[in-house]
Amino acid sequence: MTDHPGSDAITITLAAKGDGQTAAALGALALSDHTQSPQAPLSSLADAIDEHGGRVALPYGKGHCLTARNGSTITGMLYTTPPIRWLQGQSADQRARLTQALIEIELLAVFEPYRNRGIGTALLETAEHTARNAGTHLALAKIRTGAFPTMRWYRRRGYTIAGQSEPVVFRTHQGFASCDDGSDGHQLAVKALHSGSTVRRHTAGGATCLIVEHTTQPSATRQP
């Protein structure tokens, strides 16, 4: 995948063995900008990438580290995981069914000299495409409350920004499940990954939530 026409061509691939330190440097940059603490220390992530490449074994699935490259130079990274903290609070049976339903964008950063070239967008679109093909229904990111440029960036790419502590409700094979930001100073940005699904805000009894609705059955994907 390449970025905007007229700019240097970029390539989006899984991180390769040996990319760990650069991925960790970009992860630290992401944390300094706007995100929450990662599921695992960046040093552990770097070690895992150096040993195994961009697929990282985690509880309830795998993390995936994508890198953007201009030639041989890594310019950006995006790291996705199962929503581990949320899955830990589910029953074992529900957890097995929900593992594939959601993907969390945990780290996303581009080195300063390469920003405003569409690299972050290319990383995000590649992650969404990969998750969609795997049968994942919903992408979410946690954004620091008050990080309005980041919120606008996600909103322009089709994400809905939840209010503080506003839950996201979605259908599963066993009924409905919900997740929220954990009341830790962040807000959720959420996006349905299939054309047959929408995200809308629902108000009842003075309280609001975001509801993920499936209007048509997506084709050619596995169900969670």
Image (cartoon, helix red, strand yellow):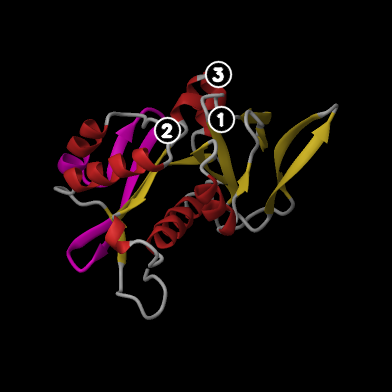
Please tell me which residue lies in front, 160 or 94.
160
Q: Quadrant of residue 69?
A: bottom left
Label 2 and label 1: CA atoms lie apart by 10 Å
Label 3 and label 2: CA atoms lie apart by 25 Å
Left/right of residue 47 with respect to residue 195 in the rendered view: left
What's the amino acid at mark 1?
Asp
Q: Is residue 141 above or below residue 186?
A: below
Q: Quadrant of residue 212?
A: top right
Please tell me which residue lies in front, 60 or 18.
18
Residue at horizontal 56 percent and vertical 24 percent from the top: 183
**Which residue has dot 2 on it?**
36
Residue at horizontal 34 percent and vertical 31 percent from the top: 58
Q: Is residue 37 above or below residue 81?
A: above
Q: Is residue 164 above or below residue 215?
A: above
Q: Position of residue 222 (x, y in %)?
A: 53, 48
What's the amino acid at mark 2?
Gln
Q: Secondary structure at mark 3?
A: loop
Residue at horizontal 25 percent and vertical 51 percent from the top: 15
Q: Secondary structure at mark 2?
A: loop
Instruction: Point out the tag, 3 or 1, that comes first from the N-terminus.
Output: 3
Residue at horizontal 20 percent and vertical 52 percent from the top: 16
Q: Position of residue 62 (x, y in %)?
A: 36, 38
In magenta segment, residue 214: no
* Magenta region, residue range: 49-75
What's the amino acid at mark 3?
Ser
**Which residue has dot 3 on it?**
91
